Image (cartoon, coloured by chain):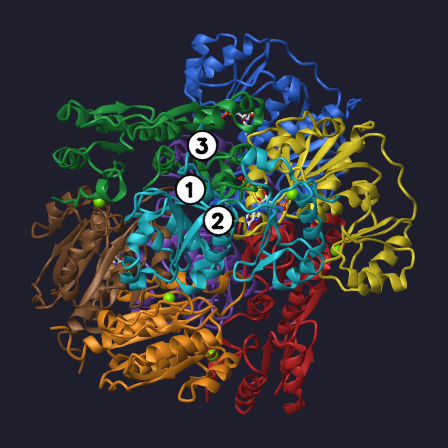
Chain colours: A orange, B purple, C red, D brown, E cyan, F blue, G yellow, H green
Amino acid sequence: GFAKVDLARTKRNGYPEVIYGEGKTAQQIIDIMYSLQSHQQNVLCTRVSPEKFVAIHQVIKAAVYYAKARCVVLNVQVMATTSTSIAIVTAGTSDMAVAEEAAVTAEAFGNRVQRIYDVGVAGIHRLFAHLTEIRQAQVVIVIAGMEGALASVVGGLIDTPLIAVPTSIGYGTNFEGLTALLTMLNSCASGITVVNIDNGFGAAYSASMINHLSQGGKA
Amino acid sequence: GFAKVDLARTKRNGYPEVIYGEGKTAQQIIDIMYSLQSHQQNVLCTRVSPEKFVAIHQVIKAAVYYAKARCVVLNVQVMATTSTSIAIVTAGTSDMAVAEEAAVTAEAFGNRVQRIYDVGVAGIHRLFAHLTEIRQAQVVIVIAGMEGALASVVGGLIDTPLIAVPTSIGYGTNFEGLTALLTMLNSCASGITVVNIDNGFGAAYSASMINHLSQGGKA
Amino acid sequence: GFAKVDLARTKRNGYPEVIYGEGKTAQQIIDIMYSLQSHQQNVLCTRVSPEKFVAIHQVIKAAVYYAKARCVVLNVQVMATTSTSIAIVTAGTSDMAVAEEAAVTAEAFGNRVQRIYDVGVAGIHRLFAHLTEIRQAQVVIVIAGMEGALASVVGGLIDTPLIAVPTSIGYGTNFEGLTALLTMLNSCASGITVVNIDNGFGAAYSASMINHLSQGGKA
Amino acid sequence: GFAKVDLARTKRNGYPEVIYGEGKTAQQIIDIMYSLQSHQQNVLCTRVSPEKFVAIHQVIKAAVYYAKARCVVLNVQVMATTSTSIAIVTAGTSDMAVAEEAAVTAEAFGNRVQRIYDVGVAGIHRLFAHLTEIRQAQVVIVIAGMEGALASVVGGLIDTPLIAVPTSIGYGTNFEGLTALLTMLNSCASGITVVNIDNGFGAAYSASMINHLSQGGKA
Amino acid sequence: GFAKVDLARTKRNGYPEVIYGEGKTAQQIIDIMYSLQSHQQNVLCTRVSPEKFVAIHQVIKAAVYYAKARCVVLNVQVMATTSTSIAIVTAGTSDMAVAEEAAVTAEAFGNRVQRIYDVGVAGIHRLFAHLTEIRQAQVVIVIAGMEGALASVVGGLIDTPLIAVPTSIGYGTNFEGLTALLTMLNSCASGITVVNIDNGFGAAYSASMINHLSQGGKA
Amino acid sequence: GFAKVDLARTKRNGYPEVIYGEGKTAQQIIDIMYSLQSHQQNVLCTRVSPEKFVAIHQVIKAAVYYAKARCVVLNVQVMATTSTSIAIVTAGTSDMAVAEEAAVTAEAFGNRVQRIYDVGVAGIHRLFAHLTEIRQAQVVIVIAGMEGALASVVGGLIDTPLIAVPTSIGYGTNFEGLTALLTMLNSCASGITVVNIDNGFGAAYSASMINHLSQGGKA
Amino acid sequence: GFAKVDLARTKRNGYPEVIYGEGKTAQQIIDIMYSLQSHQQNVLCTRVSPEKFVAIHQVIKAAVYYAKARCVVLNVQVMATTSTSIAIVTAGTSDMAVAEEAAVTAEAFGNRVQRIYDVGVAGIHRLFAHLTEIRQAQVVIVIAGMEGALASVVGGLIDTPLIAVPTSIGYGTNFEGLTALLTMLNSCASGITVVNIDNGFGAAYSASMINHLSQGGKA
Amino acid sequence: GFAKVDLARTKRNGYPEVIYGEGKTAQQIIDIMYSLQSHQQNVLCTRVSPEKFVAIHQVIKAAVYYAKARCVVLNVQVMATTSTSIAIVTAGTSDMAVAEEAAVTAEAFGNRVQRIYDVGVAGIHRLFAHLTEIRQAQVVIVIAGMEGALASVVGGLIDTPLIAVPTSIGYGTNFEGLTALLTMLNSCASGITVVNIDNGFGAAYSASMINHLSQGGKA
Ligand SMILES: Nc1ncnc2c1ncn2[C@@H]1O[C@H](COP(=O)(O)O)[C@@H](O)[C@H]1O
Ligand SMILES: Nc1ncnc2c1ncn2[C@@H]1O[C@H](COP(=O)(O)O)[C@@H](O)[C@H]1O
Ligand SMILES: Nc1ncnc2c1ncn2[C@@H]1O[C@H](COP(=O)(O)O)[C@@H](O)[C@H]1O
Ligand SMILES: Nc1ncnc2c1ncn2[C@@H]1O[C@H](COP(=O)(O)O)[C@@H](O)[C@H]1O
Ligand SMILES: [Mg+2]
Ligand SMILES: [Mg+2]
Ligand SMILES: [Mg+2]
Ligand SMILES: [Mg+2]
Ligand SMILES: [Mg+2]
Ligand SMILES: [Mg+2]
Ligand SMILES: [Mg+2]
Ligand SMILES: [Mg+2]
């Protein structure tokens, strides 16, 4: 076919290849889903518009759509859920789409997820109200647009790894998320690593690895 | 002479022309100081290196040097000090040079100044320990480098104007203060306005206007 | 609900949380308006398209739309108007949308507003014709696109704080307002602070704080 | 004193405040070291030039200097070393300074470290020769300048979290590390998070958290 | 007419002027095609949308459309095909449009082409599976978006010239192909030269020159 | 020799090749000066440090140095001076070096020059005091750093061509003159064209052409 | 009304205010046209879409539309045409829209115009074929997109002022005209000044001033 | 040792690993030279300062220094020289250092080299005087700073591959070579590929591959 699906990825990386739906036709996505499914691999497809999902769903009835996350899931076998959790914290309500992409990814990979949304620093008491909950997680994902300051504040308050996701929410000199990204890369708090703008998937992927490590580590 | 010193500025803007010392020779600064002094105007000169001050001081004995601020002051008549104050808050100890430029400027213009340094968000309890003090000021100047998140946090906690000053402290994608500037311009907190990178002088100039307004306003 | 509306903001910051309408659905805006209203808080919602307002208005009849400003206002109790004023000065007619966002915000917060539009430096006599008026304000907001030079010119002529708002009007190397922003940050006139591109709201928020301070200050 | 050392950080974040030596005088560093030491906290100070260390060492004899890493260590009590390890992989020999900053930090925090240097993609067989070793680590730090492609290649071959550190090695359009940073943020491999240019310390800090989690996790 | 078609180009550069279809109307393209054809020159027109081709085809029946490549070809006389080949290698399936522009151009200029698509570094074994094939080519075109690391990896494995084409596939800090371009310009592998983002045509043009040189060189 | 001095330039462009001294050794400059002189051409060499001039002067005694302009002149025959003039206007005293490069160039090319320095918009009355003088020139060069607003203000007040020169005076977001350049390119006043940052020479070169045209034009 | 039309501009600048049509409604344009016309001023309005012109034309029958230039002209009294000319030279056929904006502006201001289009450096013989014609002009406007090299080549061949206009034609790293702009600002040829991207109007405005000066100059 | 010298590179890439001297100590360079020499490999080391060479030469007497190119050569066996040649063309005399890096590299790899320096477009007749010579080469390297237009002009005149090298010669908006790079990437002439700023080595490496291909190609 047109694509060389990477079927050895589970063995090599611990998870099957995840389909990046952006810029692929519904038919291309269907083909790759079939290819993965026929090798007993769970399917996660990100960046799928509602319109594209309609076309996919007509062909693959078992496919499930997570609308806020814009993700499609088709599980051959559901992964066991970890006892420990990943906390997903957002600054505003507008960051929710990216947060849900992270949450659905993390759950698809068998993680327990805590959602703590709309606790940005303009009203910082909202964050403190959820601090105990956040501190219980093995790893925290902080998602923020505009100036992205929430990552530094959370980072200064916890003792676990923090993965920061800048979002493209903002205008003018926000430069479609660049400002939040720069903020997160230059944080004065330690223990923060960063992924690309709006990359909820990537943050969840790393967080899942860390959460699973905390459940046993490698031999 | 080589310069057209703006002697009408006090009348027009409320303060005499302040000398920007960077890139001027000691002799040029001395000439402008004489010119202002001979018109009964107080002199403030910013961005003066210790070496340059030695040369100035040999000629103008009454000139006073504020080393941390890199400012020279020569007062014909000291301004009365306001009863209300300007709070100057910094994130780290490295932001102190910019903070002192602001503090010396504000004091030269007759303002009471509260210095609250090294209370950045990596250890946010340090900020909360000084919140009452900060809230008493008529106007707050927040000075921060690296990611500049302190401006947003303070902005979310006060009900007076906040002037944010990004500093060039940091490395890599800090881009010599650009990241802190962008953070401050995109703050999710309201009531924050911003000046150029390292421009402690400019922040104090505006803050002084505001503090004096609060002592009576215009007719 | 999906959002954690910050109901303590009036107490902490002097004004209730203002809703940023961009990227929110009409339904989300309605929900937040209800939430604020039910706590006796005045509502201001910026960046609302005419289409969205139609949907809001069908549900909340008392909501008022300011079309040029793209703002919705729903007052529980109207604030008293200050005796002193904020002057809003624009360079061109194209800057009017941003200027009206500032004006509606300032008025919603109880300020008297003077509008002085289309007095850019290409025909500088237009500015001088309004200088007395501008000089009477406690604080001046200057709004300009293209090269944004008006801020420096006005700043050199007044003795009150000036808040500069760059607009995204222009083309080519204007870079959607970046040039005007840089101009304003690097002004050779003193007493100028700057907000994000097109941020009429933010400028008015700070200006209102300053204007109110001038009516009495803090104890 | 001039600084508000954050003495609660061990309690809050798991490690004491690490001193960022850049832009601090030897005397300032000595003061902060005394302050930490007097509270029974281990001291790590990064970005210390050999000249500065000479001055520090004259006063604090027990301080140890790691020249390649430009770090100073002063341990009150040595931490136990983990049985599992962090792998530190570099593309070229020029990335060694950043790699050693990471290695010394990780070791100071009680981690076993595997150094695998100079295995960049121009001679990719060198990487494959060390793949088994790399795959045994709980977490891998990849450090690369120029185009930074090594992060993607390693990321595609392992099943543990990878923290990528761009270095400022290169010229022209490398833009002092920006190119390597962008490469790492846009990696087509999953499980990669990124820190600021040349931030070996930050990568090690997060990696240490992950490695320790893998030794037990949080209750 | 409106254009000064460069009819001496075959004599001067070895190939006739190629029409850049973007921003030209169908009628303008038809006019230039007629002008070239009437001088016995083969026509290649790049960047032609399907809609534009419909209009062209109604007038010039012999014109052939390559849909994936968005190219139109109208040959007066078909060029002989080289015995040696150009390899075109892509990182992902999304890079196919650019790859086909390169392939159609190379074939129009009489080159044998090997297409090796979707072998990016996230699953590097796919590349190794095609290495023998790639090594047989006289010149290799590597086409990649996102972080563009494939160019460096291939460059380190071959002994022929490599022309790298960054594509605009990606999001966030990919900056529409800029990241891949920077990666390729800063490659640690030698023998790599680069063309503009998405410029499949330009890469094929140079590759064709090189492949033909290898078939005999200049006297 | 190492250089191919363009001896036909006077014939083709109206002036001999001007030597760009930056990055050339004193010996290289001497060689090119000899070459031009031996063809009866006037010599102008820009960007020459005082140290380099000492070495040049030891060999070519007739060479004259303009220290503020950093230019060397060696005239075979002095050009007649125009009756009309070029006005050179600067914003601050720090822009003087660039202004003098322009003035010396214009004078070397036979133009009468009016110098009007330090009349920036922070004290705009200084400009109005010289407006009659400026309006008498055939062409006006405006030189400004920081935000460069002076070009727009002057451009709005005159009816002759204005050539704007941004200077690298400023700090922070001035970006070494980029801000002033952008201001000038986006001016809301008409009749303004722009040259590279600090390019006093280039502005004078064009201004001289215009001033000479005004003395007669081409047949 | 909403705008303060600058009716003194002819007196001050030699030409009436030109209307910038972009972002104005048809009604706003009509109002300003009426205002200018009622003061016996010629009207030129740039950046007018065909749709907007239809609406203008229904009200102002005498208005003339230049479609390629997207300009509207409404003359109260036609200016006399100069005997000398402005040459307008473009690199490609795609630069024609900007060239026509320049040509229509120059003609509206009473200049004779020579159009020399599609003579870019890829086929440089086309330029040499028109060199005599270009050399006869008093001032030359060079308009080019992509890499903009034509400006340097023409500049090296003429002895009159050259105004360079970068256009936004191109893709990828052309950055919508930025590359051509930078090329023109850094030209190794002398006598070149530059205007904003796509600013055909501005180039013609300055060129007209120069051409008229050459017909007599100022007293 | 500290480095993993890639001894298989001749076999894999056709040439041994070339040492990048920048940022390496003299001792490190000596060690790698020994390592290569002991495996019968020719040594080329670029970016070596005169001071470093003195130290190298004291230990390795046979090492030869090319001062203008800043390269060290140590040949075990001299390669045969091709009958066909590479032309190296520069715009100015200041581009010579980069040109010599290219020339010495090409010669070290067994190519005949034609040097044609200082023929930039400001005096384009100088280029035409050498066109026959340039057209005889199998591949042309064009090296230019400032605006880099020479690449486009040469590219439009030849029928062989052109490799363009932007140099960091220039000031202001040249941005240390970025402008020339962008010019070259956006050339309207075809057949041009580009390398990093100042990368004379890289251009010569690719050119050598092409020139050798033209002498026989691959089986
Ligand atoms: N540190 C500073 N940053 C920015 N502007 C300053 C500073 N110090 C003085 N100024 C202003 O710079 C202007 C003086 O510019 P100049 O004529 O070059 O001396 C005056 O308008 C001052 O108010
Ligand atoms: N090399 C480094 N890079 C980034 N952050 C560091 C580095 N070394 C120490 N830090 C952090 O910088 C902060 C110290 O800031 P300061 O108060 O300016 O000393 C602490 O939170 C440290 O954890
Ligand atoms: N896809 C393409 N990318 C870059 N250049 C192209 C492309 N297609 C054609 N060209 C070149 O663009 C030039 C045509 O420019 P124009 O005169 O605007 O049609 C010719 O020199 C072609 O060789
Ligand atoms: N200050 C200057 N800025 C820009 N161009 C200059 C300057 N001085 C001389 N030139 C031009 O630079 C070119 C000389 O370049 P080069 O061959 O490198 O010496 C000539 O065309 C001069 O007219
Ligand atoms: Mg919220
Ligand atoms: Mg601190
Ligand atoms: Mg107007
Ligand atoms: Mg190496
Ligand atoms: Mg794929
Ligand atoms: Mg001054
Ligand atoms: Mg053409
Ligand atoms: Mg030269």
Kindly check if marks 1 and 2 are in contact, taking CB atoms under 8 A apart as contact: yes
Asked if ligand 3 lies within 8 A of label 1, the reply is no
Evaluate whether residue A33 shows in this view: yes
Contact, mark 2 vs mark 3 (Cβ under 8 Å): no
Q: Secondary structure at mark 1?
A: helix
Image vertical order of residue B91 relative to residue C150, above or below = below
Which of the chains bears the disc numbered 1? E
Q: Is mark 2 within 8 Å of ligand 3?
A: no
Locate residue E69 relative to residue G29 in the image: left or right: left
Q: Disc 1 and disc 3: Cα gap in Å?
A: 16 Å
Q: CB of mark 1 within 8 Å of CB of mark 3?
A: no
From the image, tell me which residue sits under label 1.
E211
| Residue name at image x 89 percent, y 40 percent | G79
Chain designation of label 3: H
Q: In front here: A207 or F195?
A: A207
Q: Residues within 10 Å of mark 1 (few under 14, many from 20)?
A: many
Please name the residue shown 15% across and 26% down the image: H60
Mark 2–mark 3 Cα distance, whole angstroms, equals: 21 Å
* Chain of residue at mark 2: E
Residue C127: x %, y % from top left: 73, 53
Label 3 near ligand 3 (CB < 8 Å): no
H193 left or right, relative to F111: left
On screen, B165 above or below A15?
above
Q: Looking at the picture, how far across and down is residue B204, in whole percent? A: 48, 55
Q: Which residue is mark 2?
A: E106
Q: Which residue in the structure is indicated by mark 3? A: H140
